[in-house]
Image: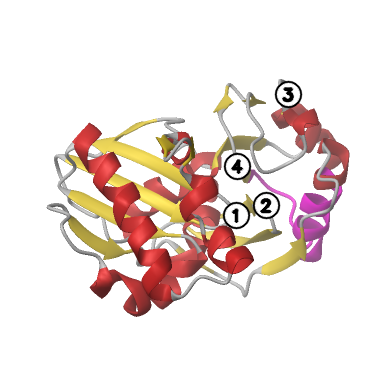
């Protein structure tokens, strides 16, 4: 069974059809830049460009970088504030010509994909996936069951949102070395571990492709730490799973 998944990020909107039996993309993903300003209508155009690139006409799952409840976007940390309290399912479904649309938090989507097909497969206890990119997303699982919309990137660290201190974007904007940035990530992981005592951290987002650059530098964390196996495609796969009701 193939379903289309779209992952809306602070810098890019990417998507592809997904084979839900194996949790992989059936075609190379298509990506467009996230518009600035990233208003609902402008982002909807970007989503449509991705979906229409494949001539897709079935269900579509779409991730959003913020809290999503019942298809309504409740927060908008890394996109235009006009997204707050928007019925995103209706907006995006209408722009896609009435296709069935399911919208969910981006890190939750990535987490569900990793727990089903990737690094969290078969793992019990408390598992936390963290996506490092424009911000920091989180997905919390208890014995394989998702606790949605945790948004742990907004935990306070050194008087600021943690993602303002340790995201990949901050690394790039401040020109931080891998060593310097890893120290920040380590402090953030220690804070999350103090609060939740997970057995496993899964590190996702684009930076997961370079896990060998920073994971070996992390010290003092009791939980096992592994990179996401689906890398930066996890959100697309999880979005498609949500659209299929999985």
Is 53 situated left or right of 10 in this image? right
Q: How far is mark 2 from mark 3, CA to CA?
A: 19 Å
Specify which label sits upstream in the sequence, 2 or 3.
Answer: 2
Q: How far is mark 4 from mark 3, CA to CA?
A: 15 Å
- Looking at the rendering, the stretch of residues picked out in magenta corresponds to 44-60
**Residue matched to label 3:** 87
Element type at mark 3: strand
Q: Are marks 2 and 3 in contact (CB under 8 Å)?
A: no
In the displayed structure, would residue 27 be above or below residue 113?
below
The colour scheme of the drawn protein is secondary structure
From the viewer's side, name the closer residue of 155 and 177: 177
Q: Are marks 1 and 2 in contact (CB under 8 Å)?
A: yes
Q: Are marks 1 and 4 in contact (CB under 8 Å)?
A: yes
**Residue matched to label 1:** 134
Residue 34: give its label: none
Residue 10: give its label: 2
For image coordinates 61% across by 36% down, the residue present is: 103
* Dot 4 alpha-carbon crowd within 10 angstroms: few under 14, some 14 to 19, many 20 or more: many
Residue 94 occupies quadrant: top right
Element type at mark 2: loop
In the displayed structure, would residue 90 be above or below residue 186?
above
* Dot 1 alpha-carbon crowd within 10 angstroms: few under 14, some 14 to 19, many 20 or more: many
Specify which label sits upstream in the sequence, 1 or 2.
Answer: 2
**Residue matched to label 4:** 65
From the viewer's side, name the closer residue of 231 and 183: 183
């Amino acid at each position: 069974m193939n379903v289309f998944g779209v992952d809306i990020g602070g810098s890019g909107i990417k998507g592809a059809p997904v084979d839900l039996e194996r949790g992989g993309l059936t075609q190379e993903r298509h990506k467009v830049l996230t518009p600035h300003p990233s208003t609902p209508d402008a982002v909807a155009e970007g989503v449509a460009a991705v979906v229409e690139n494949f001539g897709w006409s079935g269900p579509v799952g779409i991730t959003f970088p913020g809290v999503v409840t019942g298809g309504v976007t409740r927060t908008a940390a890394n996109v235009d504030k006009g997204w707050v309290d928007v019925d995103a399912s209706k907006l995006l479904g209408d722009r896609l010509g009435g296709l069935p649309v399911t919208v969910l938090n981006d890190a939750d989507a990535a987490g569900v994909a990793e727990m089903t097909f990737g690094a969290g497969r078969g793992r019990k206890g408390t598992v936390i996936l963290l996506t490092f990119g424009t911000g920091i997303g989180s997905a919390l699982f208890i014995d394989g069951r998702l606790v949605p919309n945790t948004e742990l990137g907004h935990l306070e660290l050194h008087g600021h949102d943690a993602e303002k201190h340790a995201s990949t974007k901050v690394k790039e904007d401040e020109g931080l070395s891998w060593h310097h940035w890893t120290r920040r990530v380590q402090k953030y992981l220690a804070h999350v571990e103090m609060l939740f005592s997970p057995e496993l951290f899964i590190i996702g987002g684009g930076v997961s492709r370079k896990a060998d650059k920073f994971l070996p530098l992390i010290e003092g964390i009791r939980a096992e730490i592994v990179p996401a196996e689906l890398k930066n495609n996890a959100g697309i796969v999880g979005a498609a799973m949500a659209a299929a009701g999985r």
